[in-house]
Image: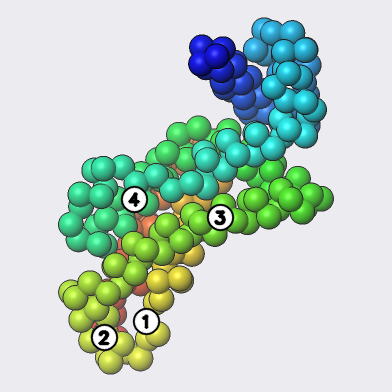
Amino acid sequence: MPGKKLAEETRREDLLRAAYDVAARHGIEALTVRAVAARAKVSHGTVLFHFKRREQLLAALLERVIYATATLRVPDTVGRVTRPADRMLALLRGEMERLASDPRHFRLFLECWTLGVRRASVRRSIGGAIERYRLGFRELAEAVLTSEDERRDRLDSSADNGALLPTADGLAAVAVSLVHGCALQALVAPQRFEVEEHFAAAARMLEALVAPTSQQRRG
């Protein structure tokens, strides 16, 4: 029956939120069927009805962690930015702010990565997610590097100082590193960390990569 199926899906979603909360508060090692049942205020059997064992809970949790930390979000406001370089910067800022706003997400990501050292399936899931995240940035990086104005600037600059031109793969990898580095800083030093300062430094670095300044050209 449609109503029953909807109720079961809602219950499963509630249990997943409870599982995420348990892991975010106490770590992945604390994730047990009983802990989730207690957090969701349901019976042990209710959890087992939806997740037959702890491994299924872990797998579902991993999907949530990946969605929170390694799934690119492109808001409509970013998509409407005309200049590719400005669009890249807007996307970077949005991702930095999103991941830094709740460092528990990235802590869970790190815990899952550690778990992946012992479990090949977890390692493959995280590796695949990061690759998709990078490819999301790569598409935009390609647009940045092939837009006529930036291309002309970079070609002029390379002729002046012999610098190697950045690639879309390289620029995408740098973007992912900057976003996840921001999340890591927010996690380990929340009292001394400001997203705006991190973004300002990242913006200057990327602008230097894409189109070196006239001063650099003269050097």
Residue underneath mark 3: 130
The earlier-in-sequence mark between 1 and 2 is 2
Is the C-beta separation of discs 3 and 1 under 8 Å?
Answer: no
Residue underneath mark 1: 165
Tell me the kind of residue under disc 1: Leu
User: Which quarter of the figure has residue 164?
Assistant: bottom left
Closer to the camera in the image, 15 or 3: 3
The earlier-in-sequence mark between 4 and 1 is 4
Alpha carbon of mark 1 to alpha carbon of mark 2: how far? Answer: 8 Å
Closer to the camera in the image, 116 or 155: 116
The earlier-in-sequence mark between 2 and 3 is 3
**Tag in front: 3 or 1:** 3
Above or below 53: residue 168: below
**Tag in front: 2 or 3:** 3
Task: Quadrant for the C terminus, please.
Answer: bottom left
Is the C-beta separation of discs 2 and 3 under 8 Å?
Answer: no
Left or right position of 194 against 89: right
Tell me the kind of residue under disc 2: Leu
| Res. 168 in view | yes
Query: Picture coordinates of residue 26 (x, y %)?
Result: 71, 26
Residue underneath mark 4: 91
Query: Picture coordinates of residue 200 (x, y %)?
Result: 33, 53
